[in-house]
Image (cartoon, rainbow, N blue to C red):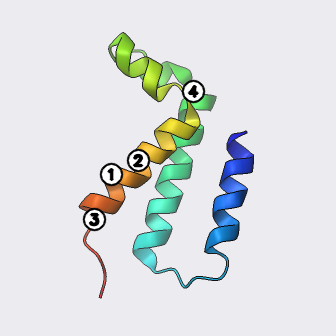
Amino acid sequence: MFGMIAVTGIKLYKNTEMNRRDMFIIALSLGSGMAVVVRPELLSNLPESLKTIFSSGITTGSITAIILYLILPKLS
């Protein structure tokens, strides 16, 4: 499921010009989404409510992308 969503997202970006900021956001989001699926023990120190939210790779990747998009400065 995560792979299908990732491929769909990549198709959307196929015809757009990406800068380093965009590529960084995509790479970190995909990496964090895959990390919690491959290594679920990374979440062992979180409270149960946060474990529930971040145990899904799709949710983790999406939240990471949104936060990075909001806090990283836009390139002119």
Q: How many numbered circles does the render carry?
A: 4
The mark that comes first in sequence, 3 or 2, is 2
Q: Are marks 2 and 4 in contact (CB under 8 Å)?
A: no
Residue highlighted by disc 1: 67
Q: Is residue 9 above or below residue 18?
A: above
Secondary structure beneath dot 4 equals loop
Look at label 1 and name its amino acid. Answer: Ile
Whichever of callouts 1 and 4 sits on the residue coming sooner in the sequence is 4
**Residue for badge 2:** 64
Looking at the rendering, in which quadrant would you find the N terminus? top right
The reply to whether dot 1 and dot 2 touch (C-beta < 8 Å) is yes
Residue 59 against residue 73 in the figure, above or below: above
Q: Observer-nearest residue: 67 or 41?
A: 67
Sequence-wise, the earlier of marks 3 and 4 is 4
Q: Residues within 10 Å of mark 4 (few under 14, many from 20)?
A: few
Q: Amino acid at mark 4?
A: Arg
Tell me if 48 is positioned left or right of 73 in this view.
right
Which label was assigned to residue 39? Answer: 4
Question: CA gap, disc 3 to disc 4?
Answer: 27 Å
Q: Residues within 10 Å of mark 1 (few under 14, many from 20)?
A: few
Marks 1 and 3, the one that precedes in the sequence: 1
Q: Is residue 14 above or below residue 9?
A: below
In front of the other: label 2 or label 4? 2
- Cα separation, mark 2 vs mark 4, equals 17 Å
Element under disc 3: loop
Q: Do callouts 1 and 4 mark residues in contact (Cβ within 8 Å)?
A: no
Q: Are marks 3 and 2 in contact (CB under 8 Å)?
A: no
Q: Which residue is mark 3?
A: 72
Q: Amino acid at mark 2?
A: Thr
For marks 1 and 3, give the CA distance. 8 Å
